[in-house]
Amino acid sequence: MTDPVTLGSSKDRVPTRAPVGLLACGGRFPVVFAEKAREHGVPVICVAAAGMADPALRTLCTEFTWLRRMSLGTVIRAFRRGGVREWTMAGKFEKRVMFRPWRWVHFVPDWRMIRFWFFRGRKTNTDDSILLGFIDEFRAEGMECVSALDLCPELLVSEGVLTRRRPSKSEERDIAFGWHLAREMGRLDVGQSVMVHERAVLAVEAIEGTDLAILRAGELCRKGGFVVVKVAKPEQDRRFDVPTVGTQTIETMRRAGATALAIEAGRTIVIDQAATVALAEKYGIAITSLVSPAA
């Protein structure tokens, strides 16, 4: 983040930092980022996706705007008014809403979004291609995208078994089997998670997101006992789409019948780690954080 500067006269100078823009979507990560920014005295100029972002952000951020339509201009103007030179994105964007009927009527895009979506010459609409395109749009306005993890790197999980229960031998085999498949899905920019039982793939995460993929695996494996493997892309850009798990992930796993979660050490965010581990303990779900599993 930007280095501290001072404001005010010589007798009443107070330490502050340049404001950071926050483009917030769903989940706890934007809230955790805003809380950490306030602790460090970093003003947050937040534009939050309506229907996705947590309303609690309104009280945590210096300036707050609901984004109720697909308007790049709205975000850029809000950041410019707040004096933003660096901005970040946090939270889960429910990309499946992009494929609803009459989507453009519902989203009411501005001209800048129409130009970005239809006339920028992207070959694909994968997460990476869209988000890197957004970053270029903001860079043209003198605003550079940074990683939210620059402010809260402690959210990245350390290596080791987080729960008292270790994965069983059969779960470890399934984790090793699924790990390389999940990395390949990430390399192809399809998704970050696979669900495995008895070294067979039950489900692969795509546009629906991790939770719905886990539930689909539970429908296909009614007896339960499967593992969830979630890893970063091989060339993961820390500015966006960093793998994230939390209490909601554990609740979904319990509902679906999953019994073990494997995540990538140093490259996965665990939101509210103590509460997440405690909930997994309660349900008998093992969580292990690996650099790479034994083959």
Image (tube, grey):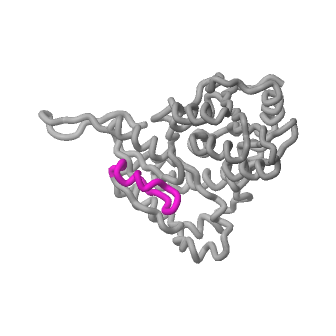
> Residue 193 location in percent, x, y?
73, 43
Q: Residue at x 26, y 34 (%)?
A: 15
> Residue 133 location in percent, x, y?
61, 55
> Residue 177 location in percent, x, y?
83, 33
Q: Quadrant of residue 14?
A: top left
Q: Residue at x 65, y 22 (%)?
A: 160
Query: Is 83 placed left or right of 230 in the picture?
Result: left
Q: Quadrant of residue 235?
A: top right
- In this rendering, the answer to whether 160 lies above or below 79 is above
Query: Is 45 placed left or right of 49 in the picture?
Result: left
Q: Quadrant of residue 287?
A: top right
Could you say which is closer to the camera, residue 3 or residue 36? 36
- In this rendering, the answer to whether 81 lies above or below 174 is below
Q: Residue at x 61, y 57 (%)?
A: 94
Residue 183 seen in render: no
Q: Is residue 49 magenta?
A: yes
Please give the range of residues in magenta: 46-62
Q: Is residue 51 magenta?
A: yes
> Residue 71 location in percent, x, y?
50, 66
